[in-house]
Image (cartoon, grey):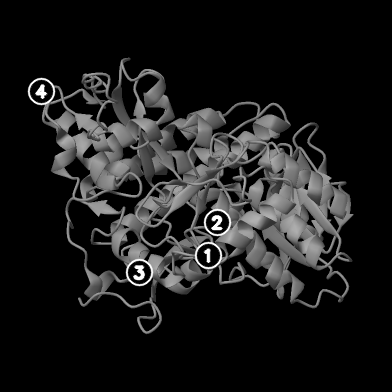
Amino acid sequence: MEYKTEFCDVLILGGGVAGLSCAAAVKEACPGLSVLVAEKNFAGYSGKANRGGGVLQYFDPDRIDPWDFVKFHAEKIGAYLGDQELMAEYVSMNKGMMDRLTSWGANLPKREDGSYQVFPTGPMTAMIATDLDITLNIRKTAEKLGVRFIDKTALIDLLYDDQGVIGAAVFSILDGTPSVIRAKRVVLATGSQNYRIGSMWGSGRGDGIAAAYRAGAELRNVEFGNFAQLARVRSHNEVVFGENAMYNAKDEHITKNFFRERETDIQSTAIREWFTQIRDGNGPVRVDYGPPPPPPPKKDGAPPPPKKPRYGDRFRMLNHQAAAAVDQDMEVAPLFIGEQSPIKVDHLMRTTLPGLSAIGDCSYCGSGVAGAVPAPPGRNRGSGILNAVFAALKCAEGIAGEDLSAPLRDFDPDQAETAFARTAAPLERKTGVTAKQVIGLVQQAMAPVEQSVWMREDRMNYALTFVEQAEKLVPEMSASDAHGVLECLEAEAMVLSAALHYRASLLRKESRGWFLREDYPETDNKNWHKWIVAKNVNGEMQFSTEEIPNERFPAPES
């Protein structure tokens, strides 16, 4: 098959906030390197940062010691399953990341004294709002620095030799033209797996995760890809912090059944409570912040006394959707989002395959920084964008420290032919199943929260029957054009992600952090204070465990 060939020093696959930040940072550190960004949509418009996630987590450098937050995160959120050193570095770099984004054109609001305008969101954190054109502005900066872009170009597979990754096979989704991009360092910035259920998160389709797995890269924490959020039943709009004011059909305040203290973000116990109420016939469940209290009467023209804060007031203010329509129908149900992000990386975002890095939403959990939590947001509002920038900067630091002066290595043409055959096969099938049929089976496995969030062995095995049906149909998918081929590749990645989730979840026989098992309700530090690692070995999905270094990341006594 004839194909085009591109050459570069650094190939970045994905043009969201992580990929663009990495491109800009690499060019700033090493202006002589050739950097190419390939994006299947349009770099600057892709990813999730410009679809409603325009908030950045902020730590006051004069008030927060990074290790104080690490301790808080380990105890309250990550359940001692995180890379505590990496988390401390993320916190310590916070102010510098804000300044870097500002230098790249991001509009972060400031006060008259020049400090960032922040608002508190948790015991130790605050947030800064940012305009949703943040990615477009970073792209403009990257272009000025000399970064090249190829848009409407999708990843098929990574190319590699016995020394590591040396490029990628890609194709145009406009006309199907195949290309090989040869590079000295490849960076995956392709996003998480979100199963196309929640529309705002629909861009996370796991194609980079699947490509890394097929090439033999290790994945870590695949079982922590089951994030769900409460959403309004009628509009499907997310109800941020709605778990604090949940009521059943008996008008009972059911939040108290699982709420112990103010949480940084929704916990899986809220999803469990919703399911329990529906199962027991107490539905529907609604969010009710209550009407605002009437103003107190004035006495002899004196100013009214200060109003006593009412439960739910702060949540009404934080929830822009509820604040705009507090008296409308607020029946809620869990909206499964996913956020599987498991490519295993070190502190410089290097995968277990030489020559391959992974940043942002495709390696958030794989880095270990989030602990026992699907990520982003990792139960830290505003951490999604900031983690992407953090990973990009660490990746750029690693690339700047490499010697990339050696010539490009040759690749095996058979690898490229095999990759291109994967895109040709759906077009050659005159009959077959559609990608949407395969995707529908996976969604039947993942969307019911009693299978994917509030887990039990029999329910997970039932979910796996849908995944196994989808696995059998993958070789039968057909397409009529390049867009259809892309959908087939994304469906295949979705099947893989679901299989990884359930097979790893069946192995972890405990409950920890976001991860809840009805049949193993207790945290087992003796046997399960460890990571689960998945790897493709000669086409077989193999799992192992990786001990967490307790001398570096201490855990409570078993």
Q: Which is nearer the N-term, disc 2 or disc 4? A: 4
Dot 4: element: loop
Q: Amino acid at mark 1?
A: Tyr
- Image point 21% across, 21% down: which residue? 299
- Asked if one can make out residue 161 in the rendered structure from this viewpoint, the answer is no
Q: Secondary structure at mark 3?
A: helix
**Residue holding disc 4:** 250
Q: Are marks 2 and 4 in contact (CB under 8 Å)?
A: no
Residue contact at pointers 2 and 1, CB within 8 angstroms: yes
The image's mark for residue 90 is 1
For marks 3 and 2, give the CA distance. Answer: 18 Å
Residue 10: x and y in percent read 79, 62
Among numbered discs 1 and 3, the one appearing first in the sequence: 3
Mark 3 or 4, closer to the camera: 3
Q: CA distance from mark 2 to mark 4?
A: 41 Å
Name the amino acid, label 4: Lys
**Which residue was labeled with disc 2?**
387
